[in-house]
Image: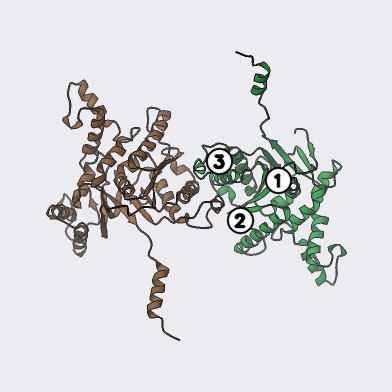
Amino acid sequence: MKRRKFLAASVLTGVGVNAATAQTGTRAARPESRSSDLPRGITPSAFSNRSSGYSQFTVPDYYTYTDDLRVERNRPGKPHKGKVLAAIQAHSDDVPLYCAGTVAKLIDEGYTGYLIRLSNDEAAGKTLGHGVVQNEIDNREVARALGCKQAFTFYYRNHRMDDIAAVEIRARLIFLYRLLQVDTILAMDPYNHYEENPDHLVAARAAEAACWMAAGDKDYPEHYRAGLKPTYVREKYYHARSPNGHNLVNRVVDISSYIDTKVRANVANRGKGPAGAAGSRLRHELAAQRKRLPLLGDSDDSADFNYVKHFLMDDWRTLGQRFGVGYAEAFRYIGPEPGYDANIRKYVDANVVPL
Amino acid sequence: MSEVIIERDRPGQPHKGKVLAAIHAHMDDVPLFAGGLCAKLIAEGYTGYLIRTSNDEMRGGGSPAENILSNEQDHFRVAKALGFKEVFDFCYRNHCMNDISAIDLRGRLILLFRLLKVDTVVSFNPWGHFEENPDHWVTGRAVEEACWMSGVETNCHEHLEAGIRPHSVSERWFFAARDTQPWNRVVDISLYIEKKVDGITECKSQGGGNDGSKLRARLANQGKRLPLLGDSDATADRAYVREFLLDPWREAGKEHGLACAERFWYINHRPPAKTRVQEYVERHAVPL
């Protein structure tokens, strides 16, 4: 029972609740109120996410929340000016679907952003060639929609990334981290349980390992000979992937102000995924039946935008409501390490005595 | 086998402005197989870089850790003795290089070939038969692949973002490291024998560079000395290398009337001054 109370408290105190929030927060804190055969006395350790049923590519099945969860809200001004973020994705639709709101928020708050795609996305398209080209275009357009300065692609074969050398992909990421002097990454959670796409895990593991190795002077010293500088990636936002996922969450980012940017990033993703031109396709399909859906508006552009916002963002809205905000994305956030040496020095200074 | 060409000394600095990368797996490979050629090319104007791919942990008489250190130190001295400007060490595990990622090794070589603007490489023959050391052929294959891929801008295209331009390697000198491996070029290293001796003598952890001083010490323990070895460890090492370790290269030279020679499989991919199409256009183009 203690554990049950503890989880309930963590969700409620993390959000600065108002009345409406308290209601949703209370629901979130009481998974036993939902359909469950969990016997009394057994504390659940994960929360099932509500789904609109409109898309499988939204929030994962379960989150486990930590007791120090924070809701990251808008920060006025440009507090991140001078900092660099890299959003790393295996496929052109990963970042748009799972963390585009946070990328847009951080860039708006001062970060210089880069989008790095690792696969060639050949498995999505009318033909393999068409898929590769369309997704290449999409990656650039997504970067543009999010306000990234530049997009990179490594072109590893789609769905086959578990066959490539982990050290090679890591080395290339180390090169880019050093070149771009990356401070912060956003990537798939490398420990996303029940992840069925090997590209996601491979990309995430490489992104994670490259973070600290990019600071080392013994890893790839030839980079320094080429004029690159070491960099230590201090902040990581690891996002979940659905369906199936189960992720540890300690950071919920309020993306309400950036939901339209997220929508546009998804609309830009035309080669694959549930968004892109799905709205205009539906509009044309209905028109052929001499029908129209008012939601879609009067043009293909409005149809694409409204389709994505209404159907594909709904689960982000539901997640946001759980935390008292309009829309939200959830992460396992890893922040800067404490100043260990400085802390020891502080202790020494405070406790040192004469000989 | 194609016609064998004798590569003789070239007066002056005909290679001035060109860049040479000698890539070996182990600290003693270049000194033994191509020390004379590298010294010759550097003397003729090349700027030379020495790249070692393994960490040499299996050789040196100490623990693997001690061997890594002693070979690393030897490698710096070998480079200096042969006239190389700079040393790069990749430090893949010795004798285990067939278990590493080929594209990781290749990617690192591509970066260096582009960064240093390498025109010419000296390395293992990637297709040399009966090469029993995996580090050798793994290195040779990666070198061969990196030579042309470094000129293709879509390979490791992130290098361009760092201002590192594509640059392909034109000339390749592949060692004839085993008797069974082919050669099409015999390089007269008669003028560079002492440089080759300098290089081999620095190979203390492996390669026989300190065999002279070890023999001198052994004889001294028996109350003997060998006049050939001189009066110090330094003279003993040099004399030993010169007298006993250069036989294969003296034999290689003898066939061609040379005091000493090294053999290579040479490949020249330098583009012609004019392509056949350009020549054809020049001959046949008419006014509109």
Q: In which quarter of the image is residue A53?
A: top left
Gap between marks 2 and 3 measured at Cα: 29 Å
Depth check: give the residue in front, B227 or A194: B227
Say which element carries label 1.
loop
Q: The green chain is which one?
A: B
* Residue for badge 3: B165
User: Which chain does the numbered disc 3 sit on?
Assistant: B
**Measured from the top left, where is residue A232 in percent x and y?**
44, 56
Q: Do the residues labelled 1 and 2 touch (CB within 8 Å)?
A: no
Name the amino acid, label 1: Tyr
- Rate crowding at label 2 as few (under 14), some (14 to 19) or many (20 or more) other CA atoms within 10 Å: many
- The image shows residue A4, relative to residue A163, as above or below, that is below
**Measured from the top left, where is residue A26 in percent x and y?**
15, 55
| Sequence-first tag of 1 and 2 | 1
Depth check: give the residue in front, B91 or B161: B161
Q: Which chain is brown?
A: A
Gap between marks 1 and 3 measured at Cα: 20 Å
* Residue for badge 1: B46
* Residue for badge 2: B55
Name the amino acid, label 2: Asn
> In screen coordinates, is B13 left or right of B71?
right
The answer to whether dots 1 and 3 both sit on one chain is yes
User: Which chain does the numbered disc 2 sit on?
Assistant: B
Name the amino acid, label 3: Arg
> In screen coordinates, is B71 left or right of A88?
right
Which mark is in front, 1 or 2?
A: 1
**Measured from the top left, where is residue A23 in percent x and y?**
13, 53
Which quadrant is home to the C terminus of chain A?
A: bottom left
Q: Which residue is at a point 17% across and 54% down the rendered structure image?
A: A25
Say which element carries label 2.
loop
